[in-house]
Image: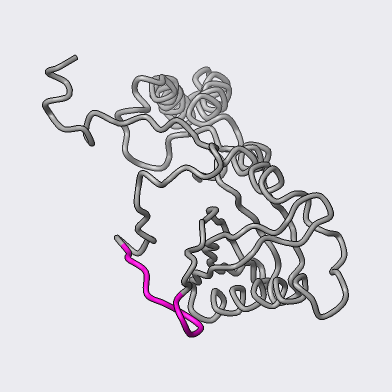
Amino acid sequence: MTRWLRANGGPLGLGVVLLSLGTGLVFQQGLVRVAGWLLLAGAVISFILSSESIQRRIPWMVVSRKELSAEFWERAFEALPFPAFIKEFPHDSHLKGNNALTRFQGKKPSEELAGVDLAALIQQDHRLGDRLAEHEGFSVQLELTDKVTTLKPRAILTLKSCIEYEGQKYIIGSYVPVTLPADLPSGTSFEAAECGGQILFQCPATTVDGNYLVVTLGKSIRGPQAESKE
């Protein structure tokens, strides 16, 4: 019923249907005429429910809502302010990268660069993160961006998760640029501070080569006294 309502204009569309049916029956005799009046009453109720002010007060799912299209979600993904990507698993087929990713690391190579060099090591790291995300549901890894002809690989902290849709697994990932310390932790992993299951970053960070973004300090961070001074 809910699906039919959404496909046919919600309560307003239902009201039009009931009005059409009821109008044709009220001029009949007996129970048919009663049914016609009931349909007309239902039409009136449907028209009332189609009011936006009424819809906001009704908690059940029968109320029609504008569904967001695939185009909306694609545009939202492209507009994410941090680099993000989607790829198949285990085929390592890169499906989509957003604008921030392309701007930061350049366009992902259409073909893998051959040879046992930095590019091969980068690919090994990326696939390791994919496998960990598929096995554990989540992965965090310090690595380098893809090797491209226009930009040098950059150090990043990549976070990945894995979903399954219609029998196919997909890796959903995002990353942030990082400045590596001179003395990297030994071994193959290290412990990082976390909060609510998220990496805990220290802010503010030291500017590098004069590059910076202006960060607004919210009143809630500055404290109650900040509002009294303004």
The magenta region covers 185-194
* Visible residue check, residue 33: no
Report the residue at 55% width, 63% height from top.
158
Of all residues shown, which one is farthest toward the bottom?
Answer: 187
Report the residue at 57% width, 77% height from top.
134
Residue nearer the viewer, 86 or 211: 211
Examine the structure image and report whether residue 101 is included in the region drawn in magenta. no
| Residue 230 appears left or right of 110 | left
Residue nearer the viewer, 182 or 10: 182
**103 w.r.t. 93: above or below:** above
**Which percent across, then down, holds residue 186?**
46, 82
| Residue 205 appears left or right of 16 | left
**Which percent across, then down, holds residue 111?**
87, 65
Report the residue at 30% width, 60% height from top.
195
Which quarter of the figure has residue 220?
Answer: top left
| Residue 13 appears left or right of 150 | left
Is the magenta region chiefly helix, strand or loop?
loop
* Visible residue check, residue 131: yes
How are the colours assigned in the image? one colour
**Which percent across, then down, holds residue 166?**
66, 68
